[in-house]
Image (cartoon, rainbow, N blue to C red):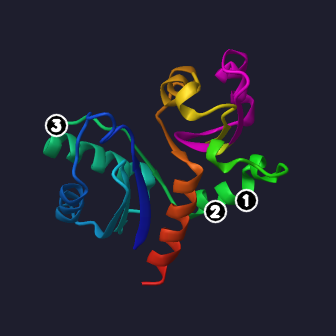
């Protein structure tokens, strides 16, 4: 059995794509997933299944959400090693006194080569900064996530993929939850 973390993009934000977490949990359990656990209302859900392929899990969840709730919700599925890599490979954490409130991670639907950073056309979003690490884009906002062009839509358009962004506090909490789930 494999535990996956499904990151749903754009649910319960500004009154759009509303899905109650208990209804989502019930839907996933009815699909045969076990150990279903959600974190906050914005679509972070752990599921355990015999399916090892994260993309297959994401596709099934996306289809069932559309069938059950009528929302076309992009889903990016990651695992514990992705979250551990966030802690280990985020170069912004190595700076002197990093402001973690300005640190975010964009989880993307495919592995990226470091040279794809040129496709992001960073001059258009300066002074924000990014670092690419496989299926993650580490972001350091100069001001805040609410005052930037470097959002999920910008990333998706420039790189032609699916992305969903989580703040640093959420990334840290999700890793703790993963560790707790493994102890059950």
- Assign the N terminus to one quadrant of the image: bottom left
Q: Earlier in the sequence, mark 2 or mark 3?
A: 3
Quadrant (top left/top right/bottom left/bottom right) for the C terminus: bottom left
- When the figure is inspected, residue 174 is found, relative to residue 105, above or below; the finding is below
Q: Which percent across, then down, holds residue 24?
A: 23, 55
On screen, residue 140 versus residue 42, left or right, reads right
Q: Where residue 70 is drawn, which disc sits there?
A: 3
Q: Is residue 61 magenta?
A: no
Query: Which label's residue is closer to the chain start, 1 or 3?
Result: 3
- Given residues 126 and 83, the one toward you in this image is 126
Secondary structure beneath label 3: loop
Point 44% across, 54% down: residue:
54
Disc 1, disc 3: CB below 8 Å? no
Give the residues drawn in magenta, as a range: 104-132
Q: Which mark is residue 84?
A: 2
Q: Is residue 127 above or below residue 179?
A: above
Q: Secondary structure at mark 1?
A: helix
The answer to whether one can see residue 135 in this image is no
Expressed as whole percent of the image width and height from the top left, the position of residue 128 reads 70, 29
Q: Are marks 1 and 2 in contact (CB under 8 Å)?
A: yes
Other residues around mark 1 within 10 Å, as few (<14) / some (14–19) / many (≥20): few
Between the residue at mark 1 and the residue at mark 3, the CA separation in whole angstroms equals: 38 Å
**Depth check, front residue: 14 or 121:** 14
Q: Name which residue lies at 65% across and 23% down.
A: 120
Give coordinates of residue 35: x percent, y percent.
32, 72
Label number found at residue 88: 1
Q: Is residue 183 left or right of residue 131?
A: left
Return the residue nearer the eye: 115 or 166. 166
């Amino acid at each position: 059995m494999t535990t996956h973390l499904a990151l749903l993009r754009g649910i319960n934000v500004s009154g759009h794509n509303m899905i109650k977490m208990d209804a989502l949990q019930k839907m996933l359990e009815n699909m045969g997933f076990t150990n279903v656990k959600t974190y906050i209302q914005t679509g972070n859900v752990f599921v355990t299944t015999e399916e090892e392929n994260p993309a297959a899990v994401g596709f099934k969840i996306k289809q069932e959400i559309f069938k059950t709730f009528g929302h076309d919700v992009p889903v990016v599925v990651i695992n514990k090693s992705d979250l551990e890599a966030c802690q280990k490979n985020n170069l912004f954490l190595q700076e002197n006194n990093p402001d973690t409130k300005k640190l975010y991670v964009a989880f993307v639907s495919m592995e990226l080569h470091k040279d794809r950073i040129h496709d992001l056309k960073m001059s258009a979003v300066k002074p924000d900064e990014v670092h690419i690490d496989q299926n993650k884009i580490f972001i350091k906002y100069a001001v805040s996530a609410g005052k930037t062009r470097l959002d999920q839509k910008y990333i998706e358009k420039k790189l032609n993929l699916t992305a969903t962004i989580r703040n640093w506090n959420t990334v840290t909490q999700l890793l703790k939850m993963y560790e707790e789930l493994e102890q059950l």
